[in-house]
Amino acid sequence: MVDACACPVLRSLERARLQGGLVLEPVSDRERDLVARQAALHEENALRDLAQGGRVVVHIPAHPPERAATSMERAMAAGADVIYQGVLLSPPWLGRPDFLRKVPGESRFGPFRYEVLDAKLARHARSQALVQGAVYSLILDRVQGVAPEH
């Protein structure tokens, strides 16, 4: 469904691939590594930019989802300015946004709320990323008791 939104030709290409009429060359490890390095650098730069001005940044360790989600909610309750690598959990949904940024507003945590920010290495928004951000925002609504504005 998301692929069909991204490109109307993808369904035809996928059908041809499944029927054996289209062979896709796998991405090389070298290309995959290059993209992974560039994506990591992009995320590091985004983190550095978000941390400017003395903002309090809390990095959520890579624990099992339930434990990480609890750590993230504690950081939200404490009013962290930026939460990095948080975990949004609302079974059956699990989300791992790159960042949650504190913004003015009201939530169950106090006179502020959080918005999802994801660092994507792309020139244009892709439908998959938009759906991912929307799901993260729906879970965040459940966690903080108010929907993100953006």
Image (spheres, rainbow, N blue to C red):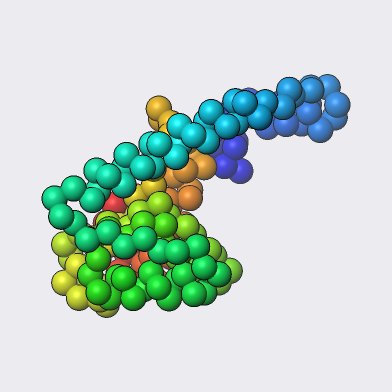
Q: Residue at x 24, y 43 (%)?
A: 49
Q: Can residue 72 be seen here?
A: yes
Point out residue 144 in the picture as x, y percentages from the top left corner: 32, 72
Q: Where does the N terminus fall, quadrant-wise? A: top right
Q: Residue at x 54, y 65 (%)?
A: 93
Q: Nearer the viewer, residue 1 or 85?
A: 85
Using residue 6 as the reference point, say whether residue 110 is left or right of it: left
Image quadrant where residue 139 sits: bottom left
Point out residue 27 in the picture as x, y percentages from the top left corner: 67, 27
Image quadrant where residue 72 sits: bottom left
Query: Where is 66 relative to 82, above or below?
Result: below
Q: Residue at x 22, y 61 (%)?
A: 56
Using residue 45 as the reference point, say whether residue 14 is left or right of it: right
Query: Where is 115 relative to 107, above or below?
Result: above
Q: Residue at x 38, y 42 (%)?
A: 43
Residue at the far right in the pictured view: 20
Point out residue 137 in the picture as x, y percentages from the top left corner: 39, 59
